[in-house]
Structures are given as structure tokens and as C-alpha cells.
């Protein structure tokens, strides 16, 4: 179910993806640091005991272990710090470890939402929602990205309904009230949007029957 009027986080699958992605970068960084540091080791140590390539390998392993520990700690903290929230008029977000960032994006400023999924993200079955706002359409990245989403298309349609001025019928308001008969919003002018709406209605009816 799409979270509404409550905080939500990226999918748990985003955590190992972020760890793998960051570790790949760390390996390259460790190699570069070790190769540079090897030239500062006294020549007689590198030549008499280990040799240049030996000292380079030792430095690489030590630096890599330090980076792996730091990356694991950072990924855990970063994932826990990432929080999103959707309400009737706007979406808010916050994330960051050393430097915390927060933001508010009113729905009436959103111009487009793109779904981004690379090959590695596809393996973890997650995507990012890249949100463009008024004044940022020419930028390479949107004002905000909802990262690590499992069901990206329903969430995108959910937000776009607010952007078009029609709150989604399936929104959970927290009031406990529900309607048994609903009609598709007039803004749903494509087959895909109507299909998503009909699936949401069927799911809601099945949940009511279980109760």
C-alpha cells in the first residue's frame, strides 16, 4: 500500500544496493590512495623487505579494510536518516549523515516525474523517482529523488494525481472512512492510468472482504 500522511523509507533492498555501489567506488579509491602512498614509503623498506609491489599490496589491503568499515557504517546511518512524507498539499524529505538535508516540494510546483533504474538496481528490483519542478526542467537532476522504490509506477501515479489536482481515491487519510463506490478521476486520460486505478479499486475491495 502506498504510504500517505505517514513517514516512509526506501525499500530494504536499497541498503545492500547502496553498500555494493559504494564499495565498488571504494575499491577504486583504495587502489589510487595505495599507489600514491607507496611512493612516500622509505625506499630501503620497500626494497629490502617487501619490494615496491609488496608494500603497495599491503597499503591497498589496509586502506580497503578501513574504507569497507567506514562505508558499512555510513550506509547504515544514511539509510536510517532517509525519510519521506506525503500529505494533501506537499511532499517533504530529509536525509544525510554528517550534513543533514531537508526539503519541501509543493505538488503545484512539480512538472514531471521520471523513473530511473540502472542495470544493478534492476537486480535488486528497485528504482528512483526523479522529480522535476518548475524552474528546474532544464537541469540534469530534479529537485528531489525518492530513492530505492520497489513499486515505482504506482507511487508516481499517486503523486501525479495530486499534481493534476485530483487526490487519489485510494489514499489512506487516517480517518477510517472509505467509499464503496468510486469513479475514476477525470484527469485519468490514458489507458495506463485507468488500469492502475482499476487495480487499486480491486485491491481495496479484496481488503474490505477480508475484514
Image: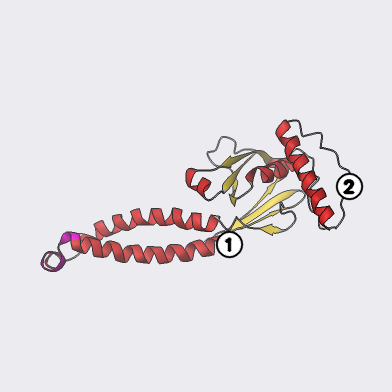
Q: Is residue 70 visible?
A: yes
The label shown at residue 116 is none
First in residue order: circle 1 vs circle 2 = 1
Q: Position of residue 37 (x, y in %)?
A: 25, 61
Residue extent of the magenta highlight: 47-53
Q: Is residue 168 visible?
A: no
Who's the residue at 25% across and 65% down the image? Answer: 58
Who's the residue at 64% across and 54% down the image? Answer: 93
Q: Could you tell me how far apart the alpha carbons at marks 1 and 2 are, in whole angstroms?
A: 38 Å
Q: Main secondary structure of the magenta part?
A: helix
Disc 2, SS: loop
Does the magenta portion include 196? no
Which residue is label 2 attached to?
180
Residue 71 location, quadrant = bottom left
User: What is the count of numbered marks?
Assistant: 2
Which residue is label 1 attached to?
81
Q: Quadrant of the C terminus?
A: bottom right
Who's the residue at 35% across and 56% down the image? Answer: 27
Amino acid at each position: 500500500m502506498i504510504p500517505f500522511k505517514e513517514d516512509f523509507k526506501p525499500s530494504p533492498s536499497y541498503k545492500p544496493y547502496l553498500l555494493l555501489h559504494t564499495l565498488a567506488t571504494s575499491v577504486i579509491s583504495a587502489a589510487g590512495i595505495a599507489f600514491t602512498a607507496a611512493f612516500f614509503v622509505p625506499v630501503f623498506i620497500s626494497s629490502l623487505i617487501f619490494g615496491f609491489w609488496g608494500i603497495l599490496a599491503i597499503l591497498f589491503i589496509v586502506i580497503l579494510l578501513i574504507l569497507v568499515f567506514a562505508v558499512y557504517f555510513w550506509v547504515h546511518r544514511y539509510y536510517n536518516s532517509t525519510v519521506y512524507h506525503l500529505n494533501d498539499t506537499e511532499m517533504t524529505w530529509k536525509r544525510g549523515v554528517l550534513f543533514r538535508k531537508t526539503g519541501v516540494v509543493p505538488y503545484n510546483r512539480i512538472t514531471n516525474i521520471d523513473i530511473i533504474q540502472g542495470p544493478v538496481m534492476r537486480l535488486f528490483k528497485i528504482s528512483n523517482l526523479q522529480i522535476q519542478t518548475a524552474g528546474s526542467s532544464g537541469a540534469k537532476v530534479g529537485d528531489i529523488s525518492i530513492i530505492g522504490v520497489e513499486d515505482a509506477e504506482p507511487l508516481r501515479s499517486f503523486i501525479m494525481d495530486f499534481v493534476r489536482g485530483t487526490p487519489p481515491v485510494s489514499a489512506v487519510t487516517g480517518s477510517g472512512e472509505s467509499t464503496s463506490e468510486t469513479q475514476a478521476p477525470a484527469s485519468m486520460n490514458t489507458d495506463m492510468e485507468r488500469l492502475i486505478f482499476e487495480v487499486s479499486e480491486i485491491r481495496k475491495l479484496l481488503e474490505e472482504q477480508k475484514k
